[in-house]
Image (tube, grey):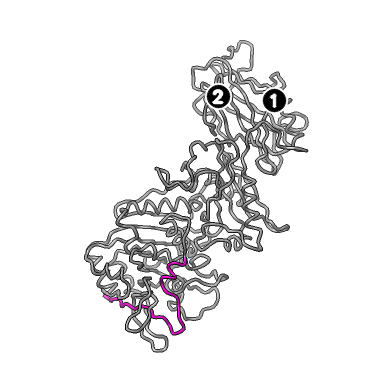
Amino acid sequence: MTTLSHVAERFSPAGGATAESLNRAFGPVALREWDPVLRETLQNSWDARKTEDGPISFKMIARTLSVERSRFLRESVLGSDARGHGPLESLLDEAGSIDVLEVADEGTLGLDGPTRADVAIAKGDPSRFRSLVRNFGRSGDDQSTSGGAYGIGKAVLFQASSVRTVVVYSQAAIGNDVEARLIVVARGDSFPRDGIEYTGRHFWGIKVDDPSIGEHVEPLVGADAVQVADFLGITRPADDQTGTTLVVLEPAGAEQRSNAQLVEELRDAAMRWAWPHLVRATRTGGARRSIDFTFATDDLVLEIPDPRTDRDLAAYAESFLAIEQRKLGIDGDEHGVSVVPIASSRKGEAPAGILAFRSHFERAQHAASPDDNDGERGARQPYLGDRVALIRPTPLFVVAYHEVRGGDDPTVTVHGAFVASEVHETEFRDSEPVAHDAWIPQAGSHLIRSTLKAIRDATRPPTFERRAAVSGASTHGISRLSRMLGAHLTGWSGTAALETEAPSASASPGARNRGRPGAQKPGVHVVIGDEQDFARVVDGFTDITFEFTVEGRAPTAPMRLSATPRTIVGNGEVEKTAPAGSVAPLVIGWRLEGATATVEPPRVQDAIGKRAAVVVRVEDAVAIAIDIELVEGERGKAPGT
């Protein structure tokens, strides 16, 4: 079996960068310890995908090498030689097992292109190997290789290793064949030796001593690379497939956490930042995954839940899915989500992107500070409060959770997603720092600043104060509501009151007793108040709060309230078919005196004798009437249904 050789990189006579400076270039970020590792490695994998929409496989596996494999790594791979790299020298002097973190992808192109950094290639030719292994950064207009917009995010790999060392294995298409490549890279401190200054970068592979270019290391290739990878137990693609595995030696903080705790942190990081890949819209109205995640140890595989079932992520995921469906031109179930194009700051240009959001009633449950890392949900705090997930179309990860104003009502929370337009992708990307964790307005460009302001303005929730927050033509349509309530829907009397009777004992669920001859006398009914609250939530839409009371005797069978808003046309009739492009009125929440506001309709038994309200979102200048029913069963008609 081939034994790898070690070469420490010397400074050239013209100078160069120290490994310390390369490690520090990523800089401090406002993310958790393992978030940058997840984000940067996953972005490199997604950038290298074979097909535009994926899918790719992405695995992060924390394991402990056996004593035999650890000895092989020390003696045959690293050759017991790490002179000048103190942390790794200490590891080589030990005899115990070595912990590793594997980051493996498939469905990707692998680390292709030249293995040397000085070989000229045409623009657009593949160069992923040297981008990851050799070079530091790249020109801003070069998007031909993986590594994000800067190519320096790979520094997090070495920061993630307590010995600053990574084994790089890849299978890539070279010509008509799939070639395996393996090399070990370390970034330590610069040091002098025998009168020579060294950068602190170290390589293990096949030593080449070329008088014209000096001493350097080439990767093992072909069967030799596969043999070493298999003996180390490295996860790799099938022989005829392409992909990459990065093996981080001795993950930082291993003494404070188990392998299971490490992969759980990484799984949670994926759920924080990469969940859009778990809810990609399909043309059949469903959702698919464009990344197949695996987070595992030697004896544990973690579940990757659907974000729509996660109590913190559901509103974000539903908002994103609504945007995806809108872009595909299909009708989806938007579950009370408002979808709003955000105009560009420059006239005549394509919109900056699409915003979708939901105002819901959960703030009492989400009252913790976003910066509070204590408690059971500390690791999930980026979601909390009024926030919108900012997303670029490539790589389709959450850049940041942008805080928006929550309004005056402490029970209302706004969650949503904004996906930037492909047309403005470059401008949004260029506004990001190295860590890709914010959009920072740039001098001379108003797009970022105006977009963030428009998102805040659009998501401002209603205050539910009794006021008319609309004017002009909008007021004309809405002002007719009080006169119409009840009169046009069911024929019941009253100019601003609607009474809904309980069903008779023999009635089917949802049926109403309307005073037919011989019908059972109703025991409970709903009375809607004379006034409504109006609150403008975004240009073109108003939230209307209808207050009502439930009176009478509590029914013995479980019952819930249900509300159906209906559009009233100019002749006073109920609109049967909505015009193309219009948005139907939508119930978005319920409030009950003495209880936390909710999106679920309340139980009739809980509502009797209390003040209650239902909130409906409607297009401006549209008149509506509302039909409130008492329905049998534990669940009524929820918003969006």
| Residue 615: mark in rendering | none
Q: Which of marks 1 and 2 is in front?
A: 1
At horizontal 48% and vertical 51% (from top left) the residue drawn is 275
Q: Nearer the viewer, residue 286 or 294?
A: 294
Query: For this view, does 537 lie left or right of residue 209?
Result: right
Q: In this view, does 593 lie to the left or right of 230?
A: right
Label 2: how many residues lie within 10 Å, few (<14), some (14-19) or many (20+)? many
Residue kind at label 1, given as amino acid type: Leu
The amino acid at mark 2 is Val
Which residue of the protein is positioned furthest toward the top in this rendering?
518
Q: Do the residues labelled 1 and 2 touch (CB within 8 Å)?
A: no
- The region drawn magenta spans 1-25
Picture coordinates of residue 402 (x, y %)? 55, 50
Up/down of 352 relative to 4, above or below? above
Which residue, given by chain and number where applicable, does mark 2 sit on?
Answer: 631
Q: List x then y, in percent, for residue 246.
A: 38, 65
Counting from the top left corner in percent of width and height, residue 569 is at 74, 33
Earlier in the chain: of badge 1 and badge 2, it is: 1
Label 1 residue SS = loop
**Residue drawn at (71%, 34%), measured in percent from left and top?**
468
Query: Which residue is tagged 1?
Result: 485
